[in-house]
Amino acid sequence: DIQMTQSPSSLSASVGDRVTITCRASQTISIYLNWYHQKPGKAPKLLISAASSLQSGVPSRFSGSGSGTDFTLTISSLQPEDFATYYCQQSYSSPLTFGGGTKVDIK
Amino acid sequence: QVQLVESGGGVVQPGRSLRLSCAASGFTFSRNGMHWVRQAPGKGLEWVAVIWYDGSNKYYADSVKGRFTISRDNSKNTLYLQMNSLRAEDTGVYYCARGTIFGVANYLDYWGQGTLVTVSS
């Protein structure tokens, strides 16, 4: 199975900050990497697919990059509604696997 | 709009069975693969199983293989998860999610609200 490792596991940030979350795969996954966020008590929501493709309706302050084993999710200017837990997920091979999550909270 | 509504969760004793359902609407159900993903209390997301759009292929996480069965009824726009020999570690919220493949992208683009399964004596 492909292991997905996210860092950091948590971070504190202020509104307006630039936030970067990294995700590393245990083997190459090309660009088969998706990002989701999840708010407490809610279902996950897809933000980015294929490493860098922003989903319809997702604000442009979100961006993704990377290929192979190393990936990055960037929020250019953190907004109040962005405080959540973020997960990466590989879809290169079965079983699908998620990273452990990065909790973004208010400083 | 796409809607996925899970049901069937509850409290069950270890070793017993439970069947979850996921009613889909707002899209052509028979065109998409469907997934189950679970989340233990306070933990991260764990993929459980997938079934292809026509039911021809099914894949499972090792943690549930041989105990859980994913199925679908395209005439009823409904996805199922039959869970047998339940264990305490199966406790969590179970989400159904639509799978979409678009070019090189393969992702879970719509999720239900989840149904809670608690395995406890």
Image (spheres, grey):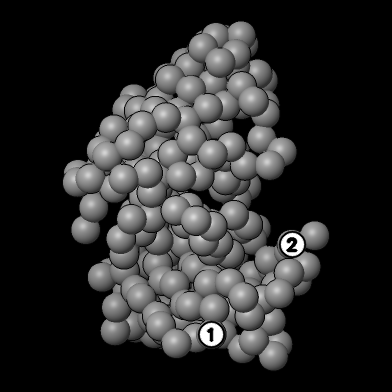
- Residue bearing mark 2: B2
Q: Nearer the viewer, residue A72 or A85?
A: A72
- Residue B22 point in image, percent of width and height: 63, 74
Q: Which of the two marks, 2 or 1, is nearer to us in this view?
A: 1
- Give neighbour class at mark 1: few <14, some 14-19, many 20+ (Cα, 10 Å): some
Residue B96 relative to residue A67: left or right: right
User: What is the CA distance from the residue labelled 2 to the residue labelled 1?
Assistant: 19 Å
SS class, disc 2: loop
Q: Nearer the viewer, residue B36 or A74?
A: A74
Quarter of the image that includes the N terminus of chain B:
bottom right
- Give neighbour class at mark 2: few <14, some 14-19, many 20+ (Cα, 10 Å): some
- Residue bearing mark 1: B54
- For the point 44% across and 39% down, which residue is it? A51
The circle on residue B108 is: none
- For the point 45% across and 87% down, which residue is it? B56
- Residue A27 point in image, percent of width and height: 19, 46
- For the point 47% across and 30% down, which residue is it? A64
Quarter of the image that includes the C terminus of chain B:
bottom left
